[in-house]
Image (spheres, rainbow, N blue to C red):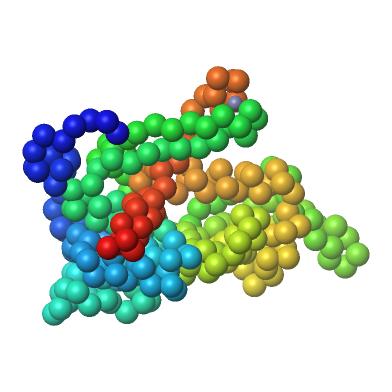
Amino acid sequence: MTDEIHSIDDYVSQDDVDISDAVRLPVGLEVNGTRYREVVIDEMTGVDDHNLSSKKVSTNGAKGVSMILNRCIQEVPGYLDQKRDPSKLFNRSLAQNLTVIDRDYLISRIYMLGGENDVVMAGKCPRCGDSWEEDTKLSDMEVIEWPEDKPLEIEFELPVGLTTVKDGKRVIHKKGRLRFPTGKEQERVGDLDSPASAFDAMFAACIVELGELASEDIDQTTMRNMKSRDRRYLMRHMQVSLPGLRQWKIVKCECGRLFDITADLTAFFDGRQESGNKS
Ligand SMILES: [Zn+2]
């Protein structure tokens, strides 16, 4: 932080990122069976800083992401025509229907379009509590695309299994399918205060099948009864199986324990909110 700035050019453009305003989504927006993968975006403006500082979104990062996307997305060729007024927002349901994968990807591209490229990956060792931080570039993060014809879900098999009682007998459910979470779930989860409740709500919404249980049999109470080992497995499995921006990586602590570090993309607009509020 002590590097001297020599010219105004260094200050304005810290990094030259070559990116077009037409981007291709790793998953695609699914509407009535058609998947739209091309999206035209705009970089952030003062309008976005203003929108982000509203009370409704300042306590829920996912709602902030939705607001940015509905403003910065200018066109979804074949589905939504180019906006007449670039400063206006698309309907709220657009960002809510995008998968979390495409949402994160779009946010990263919106930052890059605005000349931002530096991001911090951080995490804490669960054994000794040591913090880990390292700098990386958005442009260096790998992006994994999901095949066009593959359904938007992943299969899993719980290591322990969820037990229910049917006709006086215990049934163990292990194998299942999980649909990709969308902005709608992300916004709902963003209002919950504990990570455990967030987990229950997210997975209750996204598991479409678990053993003999159908999606309507699985609610937050079902999820709460799931063993810790299965809960940890689901988190990890979702992280490694979902396509999109590889915004996490596994590092080895000095104590020998392996753990994840992740890049928090919403940190970008925490900074913007603060600087916006001062002015
Ligand atoms: Zn450690």
Q: How many marks?
A: 0
Whether residue 10 sits left or right of residue 90 in the image: it is left
Q: Quick check: can you spot residue 38?
A: no
Q: Is residue 30 left or right of residue 206?
A: left
Residue 243 percent across, percent down from the top left? 40, 48
Question: For ligand 1, which image quadrant applies?
Answer: top right
Quarter of the rendering containing residue 138: top left
| Quadrant (top left, top right, bottom left, bottom right) of the C terminus | bottom left
Front-lying residue, 176 or 257: 257
Residue 229 image position (x, y, % from top left): 70, 43
User: Relative to 79, is 268 above or below?
Assistant: above
Q: Position of residue 140 (x, y in %)?
A: 27, 36
Position of residue 201 relative to residue 129, above or below, is: below
Tell me if residue 107 comes above or below residue 60 in the rendering: above
In this view of the protein, can residue 58 be seen by the observer?
A: yes
Q: Residue at x 76, y 57 (%)?
A: 225
